[in-house]
Amino acid sequence: MTFKPVTHAEAYETFEGAVKIELEKATNKFKEFNSTHEAHSIILEEFEEWWDKVKDKDAHAMDEIDELVQMGAMVFRAFIDCYANRAGSKTGER
Ligand SMILES: [Mg+2]
């Protein structure tokens, strides 16, 4: 299978849209992160799932992209849940 070349702007828009959909699904399904430690664990889990797909010779690029989207959504979630309203707080308060 070949991919049609896209511009950076098109790729950004596609990824951003997919992350927004994934973030909405995750927000409806799971409680907010209680801490940066929980966010770290979930992001790391998504990172490892992406890396497992990269190393899997039978995986399709779309499988890898799906995991990247999930990781992106969890990074957004960490920002929203752990930082968006706490910019002035100290690390130990999150
Ligand atoms: Mg995943």
Image: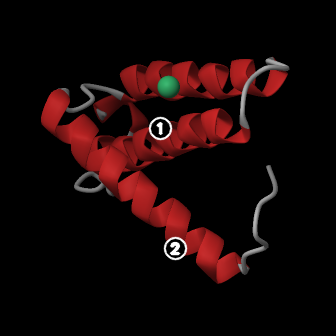
Q: Taking the image as drawn, is residue 83 in sight?
A: no
Q: Earlier in the sequence, mark 2 or mark 1?
A: 2
Residue at mark 2: C-beta within 8 A of ligand 1: no
**Relative to 10, residue 39 above or below:** above
Which mark, by number, is residue 70?
1
Could you tell me how far apart the alpha carbons at marks 2 and 1 are, in whole angstroms?
Answer: 16 Å
Residue depicted at 20% across the width and 32% down the height? 32
Crowding around mark 1 (Cα neighbors within 10 Å: few <14, some 14 to 19, many 20+) is many
The quadrant in which residue 34 appears is: top left
**Relative to 81, residue 18 above or below:** below
Residue at mark 1: C-beta within 8 A of ligand 1: yes
Does dot 2 land on a helix, a strand or a loop?
helix
**Image location of residue 90, percent across then percent down:** 37, 42
Crowding around mark 2 (Cα neighbors within 10 Å: few <14, some 14 to 19, many 20+) is few
The quadrant in which residue 37 appears is: top left
Residue depicted at 45% across the width and 23% down the height? 42
- Which residue is labeled 2 in the image? 13
Which amino acid lies under the numbered mark 2 shown in the image of this protein?
Answer: Glu
**Relative to 44, residue 26 above or below:** below
Q: Is residue 84 left or right of residue 18?
A: left
Number of numbered labels in the structure image: 2
Which is nearer the eye, 93 or 13?
A: 13
**Image location of residue 47, percent across then percent down:** 62, 28
Which is nearer the eye, 45 or 80?
A: 45
Which amino acid lies under the numbered mark 1 shown in the image of this protein?
Answer: Gln
**Image location of residue 60, percent across then percent down:** 72, 33
